[in-house]
Image (cartoon, rainbow, N blue to C red):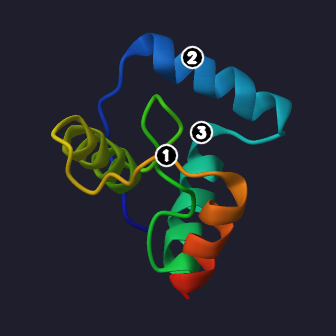
Amino acid sequence: MSHIQIRIDQKTKEAARKELKKLGLDMSSAVKLYLHQIIIHKGIPFRIVTENGLTPAEEKAILKASKEAKNGKNVTRVMGVDEALEYLDNLK
């Protein structure tokens, strides 16, 4: 059996311990469960998001598009509903 040692602040550890206790898990079992899920999913078993609820790639794309729009790049003119729907249909 192998050992893993991690450093984490006491506040985070205690908050996690309390939540795990509600689920009937101890810290060691939860870490083992997490590691098994990494193997099953072949990566992190959940979506990693920023404080805005977006993935880092999504956030980067939005910031890039926003900057381009401010510079007048990749911006279309205002259209009516029918014209906008026709425009979108033509993109297919």
Determine whether the residue tagged by mark 1 lies in a helix, strand or loop. loop
User: What residue sits right under mark 2 in the picture?
Assistant: 14
What residue is at 50 percent from the left and 64 percent from the top? 35
Residue contact between numbered discs 2 and 1, judged by CB atoms under 8 Å: no
User: What residue sits right under mark 1 in the picture?
Assistant: 78
Q: Nearer the viewer, residue 44 or 16?
A: 44
Among all residues in the image, which is located at the extreme left?
A: 71
Determine whether the residue tagged by mark 2 lies in a helix, strand or loop. helix
Residue contact between numbered discs 1 and 3, judged by CB atoms under 8 Å: no
Residue 46: image location, x then y, percent: 57, 58
Residue contact between numbered discs 2 and 3, judged by CB atoms under 8 Å: no
Q: Quadrant of residue 50?
A: top left
- Examine the rendered structure and indicate whether residue 21 appears above or below residue 67: above
Three-letter amino acid code at the position of disc 2: Glu
Residue 27 is marked as: 3
Three-letter amino acid code at the position of disc 3: Met
What residue is at 37 percent from the left and 64 percent from the top? 2
- Labels 1 and 3: the sequence-earlier one: 3
